[in-house]
Amino acid sequence: MNIVMIGTGYVGLTTGLGFAGLGNRVACVDTDTAKIAKLDLGHAPFYEPGLEEQLEALQENGQIVFTTDLSSVIGSAQVLMIAVQTPPQSNGQADLSHLETAAEQIGNLLEHEALIVVKSTVPVGTNRRVLQIIQSSLSKRGREDLVSLIKIASVPEFLREGSALQDFLAPDRIVIGADDEVSFRTIEQMHEGIKSIFLRTSIESAEFIKVASNAFLATKISFINEIANVVEGTGADVREIAHGIGLDKRIGPLFLRAGIGFGGSCFPIVVSALKSYAGINGYDFRLLNAVIEVNNRQRELFFKKIVSVLGVLKNRKIGVWGLSFKPDTDDIRESAAIDIVQRLVGAGVEVTVFDPKAMGTAASVLPSSVAFSTTPIDAASGAEALLVLTEWPEFRGVSFETLKSSMIEPIIFDGRNALADLNLERLGFRYIGVGL
Ligand code: UDX
């Protein structure tokens, strides 16, 4: 099938490569000329495991092409997917301007029957609005004949950064929100080669499944973080509690890792957008208020823990491991790690950081006083404490003897309990986790 993917960000590029890998022909379009030029040369604009290898292979066999010119590829498109950014506005509502612009462009250029699929994470009702924009652009240029031939479908993505390609090929379910049999069939055909549950539903339910899934996962995280706060220092271990409750099939073992809270481009936005959407419709989604408050407070509690152990922070030297919002990505959007580094700098701390992939992206947002080091050990050298803020596997492989001898004080604050099972106290470290 011929697919045009509009938007080459974390969702658009990964999904475009996924569909190309299934044998579809995919043309990825973006207005960012520098990004398209990089992609044309086989370079991904962000880090995602396996992405560049997949990009190279699919460009070689002509399955995927990149362009800034939608008009040059729209003519052969059977499906047009829109995966542009929908960043949060100050009031928590998603900024849909990029989506609306893409819809107008499609309406101005389309000369044939096509199925439009919205991949971006959007509030309920957005898909129908996109269709209206396209249909009104068609009418404005005298193509009323096409208006009834343009269909829309909501096929939300559930990809996790760091495992996006695997998640694309092995999803728990493929949700298809559409109004007619042909649209359902077209979407199912695009996914040929993927073994999964294909859930057919209405467009509105599909939009809600996406936001409700993310909101529930964020709720699980805030729940286990509150449990961690309650049990800390009682002798109980939140990891064992999470394991124990997770053995109940109704709860499940995943997304019960306590720490400094969730970040990323999805959870914070989706939770705020759903709360705001409910508010507009006259409903006070109280649970989500708590999910957001708990998440924001996790960073504050962690920071207070550092102050309670170290005392006055001004002019102290602290090393930091981890800046990305999670491992296996260079994405720092809404990262709790970035938030905590900024709080440290604000308190006058001399901070040195290391992250395997995200130092490039972080450099543009961190204060100039923050030092970047090339190895984890160097980041902690001469430090009075070390903070672990992202659970990169690399951190477990360092020589803790070397680490201890390079620090002034062997104190580790572990915001992800990433090193908790290494029993570092036996090496003379003071180890402070979350909920332990
Ligand atoms: C999430 C959803 O998982 C995915 O389905 C959706 O399509 C996009 O948003 P992502 O944000 O990439 O994916 O990463 P995820 O692995 O969900 O982690 C999100 C945040 O939650 C990270 O900051 C992570 O550190 C945190 N987290 C995750 C926890 O604090 N505890 C956990 O147990 C799991």
Image (cartoon, rainbow, N blue to C red):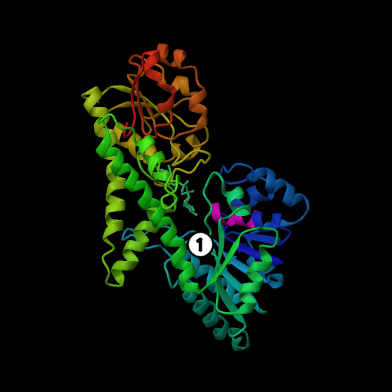
244, above or below 282, in the image: above
Farthest residue, direction top:
405
Q: Is residue 349 magenta?
A: no
Kind of residue sitting beneath label 1 = Ser
- Tell me what residue is drawn at x 41 percent, y 50 percent: 251
Count of marks overlaid on the render: 1
Q: Indicate the position of residue 214 as horizontal and vertical percent values.
A: 43, 56
81, above or below 171, in the image: below
Which residue is denoted by mark 1 in the rendering? Answer: 120
Image quarter (top left, top right, bottom left or bottom right) of the C terminus? top left
- Tell me what residue is drawn at x 29 percent, y 42 percent: 227
Q: Indicate the position of residue 417 as horizontal and vertical percent values.
A: 39, 32
Farthest residue, direction front:
248
Q: Is residue 11 magenta?
A: yes
55, above or below 425, in the image: below
Q: Indicate the position of residue 231 as horizontal and vertical percent values.
A: 27, 36
Residue 362's image quarter?
Answer: top left
In this image, 160 relative to 190: left or right? left
129, above or below 412, in the image: below
Q: Residues within 10 Å of mark 1 (few under 14, many from 20)?
A: many
In this image, 427 relative to 54: left or right? left
* Chain part drawn in magenta: 10-17
| SS assignment for the magenta stretch, majority | helix
- Tell me what residue is drawn at x 58 percent, y 78 percent: 151
Query: Circle 1 — which element?
Result: loop
